Each structure stands twice: as structure tokens, then as C-alpha cells.
Amino acid sequence: MTKKTNVGVIGCGQISSIYLEAPSKFDILNFTACADIDMDRARAQAQRYNVPKACTPEELLADPEIDIVLNLTIPKVHAEIGMAAIEAGKATYSEKPLAINRQQGRSLLEVGKGQNRRVGCAPDTFLGGGIQTCIQLINDGAIGEPIGATAFMLGHGPESWHADPSFFYQPGAGPMFDMGPYYLTALIAMLGPVRRVTGSARITFPERMITSQPRHGTKIQVNTPTHIAGVMDFASGAVGSIIMSFDVWSHQLPRIEIYGTEGTLVVPDPNTFGGPVYVRTAQEKEWREVPLTHAYSENSRGIGLADMAHAINSGRVHRANGDLAYHVLDIMEAFHDASDQNKHIELTSMCERPAPLNPGKHDWSEDR
């Protein structure tokens, strides 16, 4: 019988719903409390998902029964809440990004390591069947040696659909900090860490108008770049190009492609868990869809949290870990720095390429 890990949620906004469904997929997780500065919101989510307790963040942090604090607050307080969880003697797992700048991220990791508390961070979509299939193809040499990659996420921002989109246009968000973690984490999982970057960034529309409800007609002041184009030199030798934008009305670019000495791999949307996955080698005249080799192709947010809980029990490194999330943060901030300073930025962070999952239905008991 799987030993349950007690999880308390701080932040009961939109994203909390899919996380609160995670125990139905991962029996190691047991949600015991929902907390929010808005108690009505905390009570509503606790009732909807049969969580025993709704409380304030302070009450949740003081609860001795909670093992992991799942931090689903807005980006600017990710590091603050994570630090409070560690100081309260708990592990912390947060939504992306890890923090809004390197200084916050470094401090969080240092405190976590100093107190022997785990730090985890989304995204965990790279653990889904789609990208895990891509990792296996690369590891098996299906496209030869990877030499390059492209990653594109272009749209016109969340103000037409998100209930409260203002934070997307403040430091710690924008397209790079909001969506970049999905793409960069997937690239690192497939190709390994990055050693240096350069890039250019701009704010195209200094003011945006909310067209969604309930704040329709409200104006947003934009205080972070909304179109970023970057180049990455991976430690492996591969060279990657990336564009993240909230300024584009339409496009026909792929999401991620990996180019190898023997062929090309088309990677599925890294904000999802499934496929499709396509390969075309030098000998092939048509693209070939590759059946997924791994499980968790449906929406499985929380798999990184479950992996972390299993890792705590077994003593191994969890995959969606703080070092990986900090490396992603370092890369994202470096794109902005490169644009401001007109140069390449040599990264000071490094991380291990996350261990791949076993093919088929993952057996956590064998995962050491």
C-alpha cells in the first residue's frame, strides 16, 4: 500500500482545479487543506474537491501534518511562499516560474538545501507521454546527434480570455516567464542544459485593454517585454532558437522541432502531456507519426508533485526539481539581460538532464 503524502495548497485560483484532481491519478497524494487570502475561494475549492480543511495561508503553514506545500500563488510571491514553507519545516512545490529573478531563486534553493527541504517547481508536462517519447527517440539515436532546435510560442496575450490578466504584463511574467518554462524545460529534458544565450526583446504595446469578464474595458500598463527572440548554445553543442510573444495575431510556425544529423523530430505542444510526435529521417520521403511509448498522455498536472513525493520516500532526486527550475529562470532572465546589454550572456547555473521515465505505465516502485 502506498504511503500517502499530505499536501496543502496555497492559492486557489484557476490552476488549482486540475492539481486538486491529481489524487485520482496518483495515489501517493493526499490533499488535506486549501488556503487562500480569499477565504470564500478556499472554501469553494475545498468543498468541490472534498479537501477536509479550508484555512488561511498562515494556518496551513502551521499545520504539522502537512508534508508538502503546493504553491499556486501569483509569480511575484512564489519565492516568498516557498521560503515560508521551508521555514515551517515543509517541502515546497510551486507553479512556474520558481521566482521572478535570480536573486530570489538562489535564496530559495540555498535555504532549502540548508534545511534539507525539497524544492520542486512546475512545469511537469515534460513527464507526459509526448515529450517522454521524444526523449526516448533522441536517446535511441532516431535522428542521430542533435545539432539544433527551434521553439516558438506566439499569440496575442491572455487579456481576451483570462479573468484577471494584469499580472501577465508585470515583471516575472510576460510571454517568456509565463510560457517559456514549458518550452525551455522540455528542451533541457531532451537536449540537456544551456551554457550561454543572447537575444532581443521589446514591448510593442505599452498599454493593453482587457476584453474578458469581469474586468472588460480595464487598461493594463505593460512593464515587461512582450516579444523576445533568443539564441541558446547548449552544453551538448546543439544551437537553439526561441521566440516567445504576446504581440502576434497569427502564425504558422511549429512549437518545437529538434534537428539531428540523421533526421528531424517534431515535438508536441509542451504545455500538454500527449502527442502527436513525428519523425522524418534522411531516408524517408514522408513524415511518420510515432506511437507514444509512455503513459500520462492526458492532462496529468501533478505528476511532478507525485514524482517528488515518491522521491522523498526513496531518497532519489525528483525530476521537476529546484536546480532545473533555477536553470530555466537563469536562461529567461539572461534573454532580457542580453537584449539590454547587447551581448551573449554566459550562464552561471547548471543542472542535470532529468532522468527519463520508464516506457509504458510508469512503475514508481522501480524508480530509484
Image (cartoon, grey):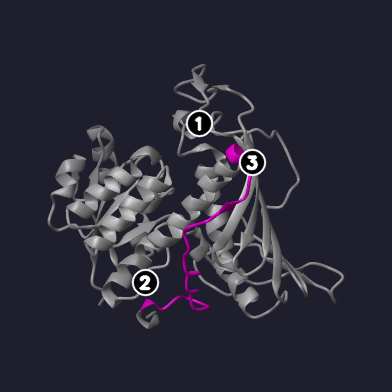
Q: Who comes first in sequence, dot 2 or dot 1?
A: 1
Any magenta on residue 345? Answer: yes
Residue depicted at 13% across the width and 49% down the height: 62
Decide: is 73 above or below 315: above
Q: Please identify the quadrant where the C terminus is shown.
A: bottom left
- Mark 1 surroundings: few (<14), some (14-19) or many (≥20) residues within 10 A: many
Q: Residue at x 59, y 40 (%)?
A: 341
Q: Secondary structure at mark 3?
A: loop
Three-letter code for the amino acid on which mark 2 is drawn: Val
* Residue under label 1: 169
Kind of element beneath mark 2? loop
Question: Which mark sits nearer the N-terminus, 3 or 2?
Answer: 2
Q: Main secondary structure of the magenta part?
A: loop
User: Taking 167 as reference, is 81 left or right?
Assistant: left
The residue under label 3 is 342
Tell whether 150 sits left or right of 173: right
Does 72 appear above or below 37? below
Q: Indicate the amino acid at tag 1.
A: Tyr
Visible residue check, residue 117: no
Q: Which residues are magenta?
A: 339-364
Residue 322 coordinates in the image, percent (x, y): 38, 59
Q: Amino acid at mark 3?
A: Asn
For marks 3 and 2, give the CA distance.
37 Å
Q: Image check: 273 left or right of 118? A: right
Observer-nearest of 224 and 138 = 224
Q: Which residue is mark 2?
A: 317
Which residue reaches farthest right? Answer: 285
Q: Which is more toward the observer, 176 or 12?
A: 176
